[in-house]
Structures are given as C-alpha cells and as structure tokens.
Amino acid sequence: MLTMKNAINELKKIIAPEKVLTSREDMLSYAYDGTPLLQQLPEAVVIPETTEQISAILRLANREGFPVVPRGSGTGLSGGAIPVRGSVVILMSDWNQILEIDKANLTAWVQPGVRTQDFQRAAQEQGLFYPPDPGSQAICTIGGNVAENAGGLRGLKYGVTRDYVMGVEMVLPDGTVMMNGGKNVKNVAGYNLRDLIVGSEGTLGIFTRVLLKLIPKPAASKTMLALFDSLEQAAQSVSDIIAAHIIPCTMEFLDATTIRCVEDFAHIGLPTDAGALLLLESDGHPGQVADESAKMEEILKRNKATEIKVARNDAEADRLKTARRAAFSALARIRPTTILEDATVPRSELARLVNTVTGLAAKYDLMVGNFGHAGDGNMHPTVLTDERDKDEMERVELFFNELYEETLRLGGTITGEHGVGLAKKKYLEKMMSRPEMQVMRSIKKALDPNNILNPGKIFS
Amino acid sequence: MSHSAYYDQLLNCMHCGLCLPVCPTFSITGREKDSPRGRIRLMKSVADEQMDISTGYMEALDFCLDCQACVSACPAGVQYGDLLEHAREEIYLHQQKEGRVHWFKKLTLGWLFTRQSRLRALGMAMAIYQKSGLKFLVEKSGVLHLFPEKLREWHRLMPDVDMKRPPVSVASVGKKKKAKMRVGIVSGCVQDIFFSSVNRDTLEVLAGNGYEVYLPPDQNCCGSVAGHNGDTETARELARQLIDTFHGRVDQIIINAAGCGSFMKKYDQLLAADSAWAEKARWFAQNTRDIMEFLDENGFTPPENALDKKVTYHEPCHLSHAQQIKEAPRRVLKQLPGISYVELPEAGWCCGSAGVYNITHFEDSMILLDRKMKNLKKTEADIVVTGNPGCMIQLAYGNKRSAFQPEVLHPVSLINRLYKKSAEGNNDD
C-alpha cells in the first residue's frame, strides 16, 4: 500500500493538480456538513471534471485502500458528507449543469451539483413543476437530495425526491459506470435498483447524471397561516383535516419557541405570543383550491384558531414559506448548539408525538423547539443547548434515547427525511430487524467489497 | 469585542450553509473557504489553536469583501461583520508583532487617513494631474502601455476629484429659532475629496427642510478604513476625535456614506472598554443616522417639480446588510414626483467596490462589477442611485466598461436636483 502522500501524487496524475486540494485551510473547511457536533479532517479534496476521472479515483482507492466520501454543498443533517478518517472527499458541486428539459416526456437530465432551487426555477420557466423542496433548497444539490432521499414542505401531497427520480448514471464503488432507469413511465424490467440507489447516502455509488420527473405546474394555489393558543389545538386540526380526506400541498407546524425565533429573523409579523401555528397551502385547479381551503378554514376555526391569515399574493406566500424553511437555523439564535431530530410517526399519532416531546423536555430540563411537517407526521424536535456544558449534553443524550424509543413504540421511524449517516446509526439497529440489517450489509458488501465508499455511514 | 464574546459568536454558527448562495466570493470560486461558513470555521480553528495565523488564513480573510450579505441571510443571527473585524484585528496585531505590516498599509492606515489635510493634499495633487491636461496627455501618449495592465486599469478607475467643497467657513447653516433640530454632517474622507457635492447636497437638503445644520470644516476620517483593516487602535483614536467634534453640539449626526455609517453606529462597541469615552460613544452611536434613514424617519418636503426619469437603486452593502436599512431609501425615492422607480435585480449583491477591494483584488472585483452592470442594463434606468462613495466610484467605472451607462448619483443629490429645479421653475430636464 502506498502512503497517503503517494496516493495524493497518484490523484494528481488522474486530475489536474490544482483540482486536488490539500491545504490546511481547505481541509478544515471541508471537515463538516450541516450536522451538529461531528467533524473529521479529510486527507485531500478532489474536484473531478469527468466521469472517467471519478472512475479512476475509485479504482485507485480500491487498490490503495483509502476511503472516498462524496460531497455536494454540505448541508446534510445526518453526517453523510462528513469525511471519515484518512479519506479523500470528491466534491461534486461544480457539476452544476441542467443538461436537458424534455417537455414532450416531462423529464430533465441534470448533473448532480445543480442546486435544487435553480432546478425548480428552470422547470418553472417551462411551465413545469419539481416539487421536492428541502429547507436548504437555495444551496443543497440534486445529488445530495437523491443520496439522502430528501423531503420538504410539499411531501404530504407530492411525495419526496424518490418519487421524482427516473434514472441515474453513477460510478459504482469499484469504478464501473452504470446507467439505470430511463424515460419510460412504466418499467418493471429486473430488480428496482432505483429505489436502492435513492437514499443510499453516498455508500453505493457517486452520481454523475440524474434523470428527474417533472409535473405540470398547478394552476392555482392559496397559502394560509393559522394561529392557536395551544399545541393540542394545532395538532387536532391536522388530524381533522386528514380525517376529512383533504391532502393539502403543505401542512407545517411551528411551536411557540420556533415562532419567536423565526419572527426574530424574518420580521413577517408573526405574533410572538402565539402557542402554535400551522402553515397550510392548497394547490391545483382553482375550483379545487377554493373548495379545499374553505373546508380547511372551517376546521381551523372549529379548533379555535385565534387568527387565520391568507397570503394576498405569491410573493407573500413565498415569504411565509421561506421563513418556515429557516426555522431550524433560526432556532440557533437562542443557544449556541442546536441539535435537530427527524422523528416521524403515522399521522394519527402526531398529537402523541408532540406531547411526548413536551413531556421529555420537562423531564430532562431542556429547552426544545418543535416544528415540522405535521401533515406527514414528520417532526423536527430541536434541542437548544451548549456543547460545552457536559452535564446538559448527557441529558440531551437521554432525551433523544427516550424520544426514539417512544417514536418506535408509536410505530414510527428514526428518520423521515434526513437519513441515518453517522448521527442516527446507533438507533438503526433498534429499529430494523436482524434480517433487514443483514440484507443491507450483504448489498453493501457485494457492491463495495473493500468498503471504500463512504464507509461507516448508515451502519458499521 | 472581547475574545469570549468573539468565541461565543463563532459558536453561534451552526454551519447550515444558508449563507453560501448569497456570498459573492463563493459564487466566484465555489470553494468552501471562500464562503462565510468556511471563514467562520477557519476563525474558530485559529481560536481553538488547530491552526496558526497562516498565509492561507490571511488570504482567505482578505478575499472577503465584508459585504455582509451573509448577515442578512443568516437565520441564526450570526454577526459575521463583527467576527471579521475581530479576526482582522488579530491578524494586524500578529503582523505588527512579527514586523510584517505591509508598508502601504502602514502609510495609508497609520498616516494618510489619520489627517484629512493629508488626504486633501493628495486630492489636490490628483486634481492638478486631472485638470491640467497631464492625465489627458498620459492617456493619449500611449505611455501607459509601458506599465502593467493592472496599473492601467487603476488609472482608469480613478474618479475625478470634486473641488467644489462646501464653503469651509460655514460652521452652521440655517440657524434660526424655529429650527426643528440641530444636526451635524460628517463630511467623510473619500466623500470629502471625490464627492464633496454630495456633502453640499446633504447640507442644502437638510437646511431646506428646516434643520439647523452643523458642518465643521476640519473633520478627519471616521476610522472605518483603519477598523475594517484590523488597525483598531488608530480607529479608536479617530472615533474619539469625531465624537468630540459633535458631542454636545448637535441632536443627531447625519452621514451620507454607508461604510462610515455602519462603523459609526458601532462606536459604542469600539470604545466600550474606554471608561472616559464609553458613554459619549453610546450617545454617538444611538444618534447617528444615514441621510436616507433620517429623511424616511422624519419626512421631507416633496419637491414641487417632477423629473421624468427612470430611476433604480443599488443597495450599498454597508447600508443594506451591515445596518439593515433596506426599504428606507426606496420609500424616499418613490416619493419623488415624476420618477418611475424600477427595482434592480440582485440589488443587494455587492458591486465589488468594497473599500479598496477593486485595487487589491482587481479581477474578482471586475467579475462582480460586470454582473452588476448586466443587471443594471435589465432595468433600462436613466439614473442609478446609491448611498456610498465606494459604490459610486465603482459604478462610474462600470460605465467605462459597459455599453449601458446610467447616470450614477447619490440619492440625496437626486433630491436636491429636484429642489433646485423647483426653485428655478424649470420643467424641462
């Protein structure tokens, strides 16, 4: 085996030397992603320009035994892009071209480094719609979204990234280039590899091109904000809306702490004494939107909403949604360390999950902000703490352990949209059965026998 | 900022990455160390002693425009401007200890900008060069081709010196019993040399609106040039001088340069540890107003005559992001009769001026300027207004590079133009 220094020299033979970064400053600034508390310096960061180069890097990694970690914009929340010890990071954010928007088939070929919001806008210019909209959409990349199977505010009605991936070209861990999928709406030839690739968290391959599905842009939409005195009233409204067989595009929940932080940042006139709020959006045919939002308003009023505000235009609706997307980061205003989780339960159990969070926060004497995608049972309870306070950090650990036990007891999952990565690895085995874990490990072993691609993520 | 406050602020960054898409330098290189999130991580690494104050670290911080677009974008409220200033001070002290402060920095920060008389002498020399025909000769003779291209570009960048300074003997205008308020004007250092007409317009607009105006002739730089470059001691001394000039003499202090305003509003932080000056500094910071902010807060007499022009507004970073004054200038402009206001795409995106960035990082600065000019073209505006001398110099230079050439004005000059037009009763501009 070569030493790392020699391996870096080999890398410089594969790609231009100035695309191989090794300075202390560069290594420190690629040591993290959006995940709190975790960091690890890589040995080098490389910026490939061709698929062949990626393939050659992976072959070298197999030969010399160094790990490789793919990275987009580094906004992930489970540690998927955090380097592992002795690794080389492959930076894909320069691969930012939209290659084709096919209006006849309603599909688009994009490079993995395209920013989600840029792609949404490009689709919109063609009268088309790409629904997945994670909180970091202004900067996160399609490649990262596919790797993590990212969700967003519109997941309730439109689903998540997986529902929009039709094909992927990728470099497998051994350097083989594989194309899977295509523009066929229906296709049952062979195993459904797509569903294995989406959400593989950078452990099964590095994407070089992604084929995405587009849908027609809804003709109308209406966004509204409902304020409540209590959490229960908001949670009950969500259950009642679903029970009335209404599936709005968006149904987002914010608790009192989150409302205050968001208002402090965005100044959009949220009452800082509200106990909870729901942000709702109905979209589709104008008639359907009118009907659906009237029914929702009725339910909100029945649950004693203290105020219902309707956005007057698209710009105002956008401001509300942008403010909601900033919720997680805005919570960092209160305490230096912000640890966010991704507990998800069947929708009928939402009220119970919300109450569990409140109860556990009191039990462990922690400050917790809670918000999330109420409509799909996906909450982001966020502990506001200080990593320097060892005693408090121990209580944080106990809080999350108990929260996840309760989530699983309610039939929920440890992660709805952020992925397992490093952050939730230890909870995965509690959730999955032994055969499930074994199948996952066999797949990883079959595709990556030397365990060089993003090793130690999802499971060890 | 104390070291512990600095460290707390560093920890407030939860590295979510929402600052990346608004950062101009990140847009140029796409490298994490050229983003606010990356720079904060480097500052933290130095604070944690994981890294020395290396050449690479200094370059990374030097590459930052200090436009603070990231401050507007940051949901967590991280005060990046304060962090950068503290980090640059650390670098300056480190270089001083090592005896490695660049001679040009010493000359400009420690000597040239500490006395306005020195800057004026330089301004006078430049004016003679420009007005005597020597500049014309140099340009036409082709002698510039003997110099590197960069120097030639700088030569073109240099704006004309504005010799029509407000009458220096006037210490107080509009003194009357019924004056609404007594306000002081900070004449600035760069503004005083290149745009003294902006100071004159500020004075006339305020006096015309019934304020008693105090404009002392011998003011020095506010200290922002030194402060933004890490020389905090010099900045403190200049701040004390400026506070002394106005304290006890005026109700409010008016500034028409965004870069100065953002620095003056933080005099309280700058002099917090100086017991003799802390109280006065707090007063000064609380009572400083940008001219557009002041007119928006207190209202102004609308000019009688209309100006049939399309006007757009470029946000100075140090007004929009550092002082969070975004809507006030727009509200004021929209009150001007006859004007059709058109919004500039990416109005809050830095023009690349950023102090002396267009000299120290010429190529990168031009990438940003060309982007700005492209956006300006989309507006088809006749006039672009902006409230900072650095931006005005940069946009004027943009006009030399671009086929689309809107007139560049300070908003207060536009207002005064309408007042004067009204006074002349002249309706055909």
Image (tube, coloured by chain):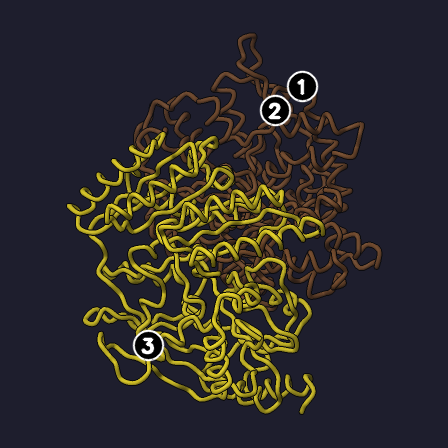
Chain colours: A yellow, B brown
**Dots 2 and 1 on the same chain:** yes
> Callout 1: helix, strand or loop?
loop
Question: Which quarter of the rendering shows the C terminus of chain A?
Answer: bottom right
Q: CB atoms at circles 2 and 1 under 8 Å apart?
A: yes
Q: Position of residue B277 (x, y in %)?
A: 76, 28
Where is mark 2, residue-wise? B184
Q: Chain of mark 1?
A: B
**Dots 1 and 3 on the same chain:** no
Disc 1 versus disc 3: nearer the observer: 3
Name the residue rendered at 70%, 22% in the picture.
B247
Q: Chain of mark 3?
A: A
Residue B224 seen from this side: yes
Q: Chain of mark 2?
A: B
For this rendering, which residue is in front, A283 or B175?
A: A283
The answer to whether B305 appears left or right of B317 in the picture is: left
Where is mark 3, residue-wise? A167
For residue A401, above or below residue B299: below
The label on residue B249 is 1
The amino acid at mark 1 is: Arg
Q: Earlier in the sequence, mark 2 or mark 1?
A: 2
The answer to whether A235 appears left or right of A2 in the picture is: left
Count every numbered label the image shows and give the total. 3
